[in-house]
Amino acid sequence: MHTKFHTFIFVLFHFVVSVVAVNAFAADVRDIRVAQQEGVTRLVFELSDASEHRIFPLSNPERIVLDISGVDLNNSVVNGLSALSSDVLMRVRYAKRENGVRFVLDLAQKAKAKSTVLAANGTYGPRILVELEYGVQKPVTVVKSLANLSKEKRDIVIAIDPGHGGKDPGALGQYSVREKDVVLSIGKELASRINAVDGFKAVLTRSTDTFLQLRDRSRVAREANADLMISIHADAFTKSSARGASVWALSLSGKSSEMGRWLAQQENSADLVGGISLDDKDQLLAEVLLDMSMNSTIQMSLNIGKSVLGEMKGVAVLHKDSVQQAGFVVLKSPDIPSILIETGFVSNKTEAKNLSSRTYRVKLAESISKGVIEYFTRNAPDGTLVAWKQKKHSDYVYIVNKGDTLSEIARRNQVSLPVLRQANNLSNDVIWIGQKLVIPAG
Ligand SMILES: [Zn+2]
């Protein structure tokens, strides 16, 4: 028995050594997202590969421990950890262990914790969803993705998705106007206008006449860490009198107007052309769980849509002057606000003529771009160049994080080291975690 035990220890040890020798675990924690809804905080730990985990609570003080085995943490996740919090979640700490990573979720109050494993799908890697339930709180919009926070002074990324393409022509209209051509042209014009603005970057889901499945469209947005996805369409209706542009956001309630249901049906069926139905029932549970940030994302989508509509009304006749909601599949990215723009009806003679004119399409793209830029200038996400420029007009206080050095903080904030020392009455470069540093205005 005794000998056996030693053999076992040896084998285990040997195994550990060989794992360390290749200097990496099989999987990485790619991103951690936090969202808060009424009485529930949800954390999603997205991995590069499926891994075992366990979760248990500790008291005095209240905390939840999550051990994920066989994974490593990359630096962007480590650097962003301090930004993750909610009403109940005070902070997330981590410790690298021999067999993986231990996360400790420090809580402001006792909460019931449970975890669920979500398999990888087309958009996301395998995920561990941790739900913290702690009674009813007021809903707050909190959606933070480490992938978005990791880069400082990053561009605000707008994913532009011209609908249809390739073997899927979309709506066919008067004067042989095809939806796929019109929306590609508007999309490209929009991208070049957004790229022309400092601090903004556009990515197109397609820039040629190719067919894309819906899931590939949102994958482009997600891989680019997009702050917004804009799908561009033009429709045809059975009555040629139907006219006007409209802006749509996702509806979770299933409540939408008759026109909304009809449009959603038209646009959603596009994927069937590729032979894959998105009405996959098994996918449903994962999707529902993934909806963690849907409510706040939808609210943001509605606000962006409103800003866009405000500019579009100077160019196009509007079908409805407020943002409409319906169940468009292409808008179902849980952490990326998304709007769908119906630029007009190609089944209407006037609008088909308008949409086939380059001058009109450029004007329309300009107005959409204006609405988007205006919204994100007013609501610049943390860590973006646009936010940084606005902050630069006044001094602000930076709280020192683990691993920070004074020279690095100076470099990141584009102030010289002597200026930073002087602003904080420092005689040397020793700083400590939690120290408040004044960053002088540039
Ligand atoms: Zn369409």
Image (spheres, grey):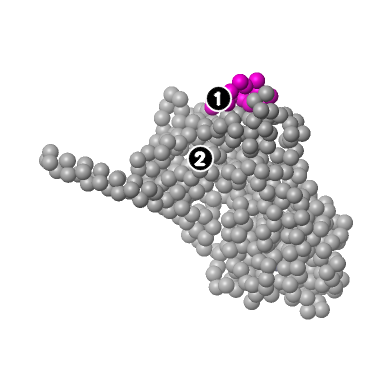
- In this view of the protein, which residue sits in the foreground, 375 or 194? 194
Considering only order in the chain, which callout, 1 or 2, is on the residue closer to the N terminus? 2
| Circles 2, 1 touching at the beta carbon (< 8 Å) | no
Secondary structure under the numbered disc 2 in the rendered image? helix
Question: In the figure, is residue 259 to the left or right of 143?
Answer: right
Is residue 314 in view?
yes
Question: Which region shows up in magenta?
Answer: 423-438
State the residue at coordinates (60%, 73%). Answer: 273
Q: Is mark 2 within 8 Å of ligand 1?
A: no
Residue type at numbered disc 2:
Val
The C terminus - image quarter: top right
The N terminus - image quarter: top left
Secondary structure under the numbered disc 1 in the rendered image? loop
Considering the whole magenta stretch, tell me its main secondary structure: loop
Spatial CA span between label 2 and label 1: 22 Å
State the residue at coordinates (17%, 44%). Answer: 7
- 293 in relation to 413, above or below: below
Q: Which mark lies nearer to you, 2 or 1?
A: 1
- In this view of the protein, which residue sits in the foreground, 95 or 236? 95
Disc 2: CA contacts within 10 A as few (<14), some (14-19) or many (>=20): some
Instruction: Report which residue position mark 2 lands on.
Output: 78
The circle drawn on residue 430 is: 1
Residue 23 pos. (x, y %): 38, 48
Residue type at numbered disc 1:
Val
Residue 428 drawn in magenta? yes
Residue 98 pos. (x, y %): 35, 40
Q: Is mark 1 within 8 Å of ligand 1?
A: no
Disc 1: CA contacts within 10 A as few (<14), some (14-19) or many (>=20): few
- In this view of the protein, which residue sits in the foreground, 294 or 85? 85
